Image (cartoon, coloured by chain):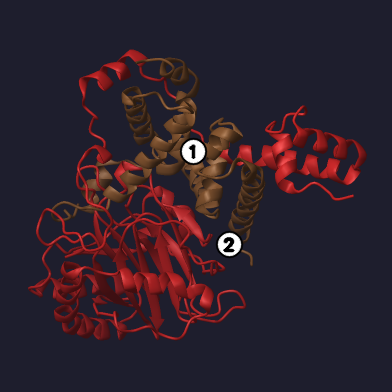
Amino acid sequence: MSEPWATIYAEVWEDLVRYLDRKVWDPERARDLAQEAFVRALRADPVPEAPRAWLFTVAANLARDEARSALRWRGRLRLVDAEERDRREPPLPDSELEATERRRDVAAALDALSERDREVLLLWQAGLSYGEIAAASGLAEGAVGTTLSRARWRLVEAWTRIGASEETGGAPR
Amino acid sequence: MAHLDDGRLTAWLDGALSPESPGGEVVARHLSACADCRSRLEEERSLRTRSGEILAAADLAPSSAPEFAEIVARARAGRTGQTGPGRPRGRGSRGSRPASPGMGLAWAASLALAVGAGWIARDLSRERGVPLPPAMRPPAAELEERAVPEPGAAAADRLGAPRAAAGRAAAEAELREETAPARRDASKAGHDADADPVAAEDVSVRTERAAAPLTRLATGVASDAFHAPPDAAGLAVAAVAGHAAVGCWSRPAGTGVAALLPAIRLTDERAPTAKAGGAEATVLGFRVVATGGAAGAVARWAPFGPDSVWIGAEGNGTMRLRVSGDRLDGRMLLREPTRGEAVEGAAPRGAEAPEPASVAWRRVPCGP
């Protein structure tokens, strides 16, 4: 039951967590979802042909389902006194602030991409091959190169735009 | 000779085209003969490097992986854990009803602010404002269509109509006040509204120091997308002399997330600029909405017509605010997350934001 997952686990865990973190922007949650993805992998019978691609597809679905289900509130919203909240959550130290802001900027840059471009880029970043990216994203393998090229360009472009806007105080046209 | 397209160059660069394959041979041969394509290959390479660096900027310190044996044990135990997807769930947000009464999956709250004063709620569902350029139309049209299942709309009306009279009166009174006492007066307006029987939750006014991550936005640096940290709950309306801002946040129920709305400060100088073409706004801050405890959501905003601002939060909700004279009217919808709905547009520039400490926040009920 464990093979090939045991090997894949050792190789891919960090990449999978990072991949999920780029979707849910929460490292704790990303770890939970990554574990969940592996649990499902271990239960998959038979073992899928492109196991890493399958794993990342499952992870992407988990992240997406999570985002959807999060909207289904149960019960009434409970208002929290802002003072109470401030007491419980002291302000972040500068180093964390910087990281938060950086992540915010990366998220914003990623958000400038189309869903497909973003997905392919994240899968590449996670170390998947073109064949695996095609399998996980549904793209034809021949289209992966074009998509990646465009995605990288858009990301850099968006990042530049964000950086420029922060310097001048407004997004440039 | 025909040059190599970006896709093939990239595939070659990424090692997806083996030199032995027919496709690879073509590329290798062409590259050896074509300096242009060689330099384009280097461009692709540096694009790859650069985009990798950008993505890496979001990395946090990695933590150790759980023992694989633990995961095996979980898989064998037959429990899928506490994650959201394991629970039975409905599909889509339209038309489905929540388990608990009174809480729709998507709900609309109409609210409007008077600058420097209390607030007025008004249902804008039938107002479309000026015709929009086609590029800006789709999100709004989608919002209006996808809006609100019955409970939400009913709640919005409940929220809207009865408060309107009290709020409007308070607002008009406020507008005649000096700016200096505006903070105190805002609190009076708040208490007036409190007396309204429809106000279901605690409403209070206090001076709140904005959380540190907001400071950057509050200094007048605006970007057209930003990332919200998780935060507490409620609907906040900020009234600052000469400006209005609104933010909404909700406490997550369990691992659920609620609504992200940015707090926006609108300047009262609506000098049209070449870029914004109308209302200027600076994002002052924002509140919760992280999905499943996520660190935040990305929100975008853009000019929406000559006098309004559209704010969309990825994964959560949107709010459209219209500046009308010195009033800020808005409608907020909470809906399922979709990507790519942000409207491209310049981020308007705003004047320096006031010190966070001078912002007076009012909490009002959020949602039905």
Please give the label number shown on residue A93: none
Q: Is residue A153 among what the camera can see?
A: yes
Q: Is residue B225 left or right of residue B361?
A: right
* Marks 1/2 same chain: yes
| Residue on which the image places disc 2 | A169
Q: Amino acid at mark 2?
A: Gly
State which quarter of the image contains the C terminus of chain B.
Answer: bottom left
Q: Is residue B57 among what the camera can see?
A: no
Q: Residues within 10 Å of mark 2 (few under 14, many from 20)?
A: many
Quadrant of residue B139 in the image? bottom left
Give residue B268's position: percent from left, percent from top.
45, 79
Of B111 and A97, nearer the camera is: B111
Q: Pointer 1 and pointer 2: residues touching (CB < 8 Å)?
A: no
Display colour for chain B = red
Report the label total. 2
Nearer to us: label 1 or label 2: 1
Of B43 and A109, nearer the camera is: B43
* Element type where label 2 sits in the image: loop
Give residue B203's position: percent from left, percent from top.
16, 64
Q: Residue at x 46, y 20 (%)?
A: A8
* Element type where label 1 sits in the image: helix
Q: Residue at x 40, y 34 (%)?
A: A27
| Residue on which the image places disc 1 | A136
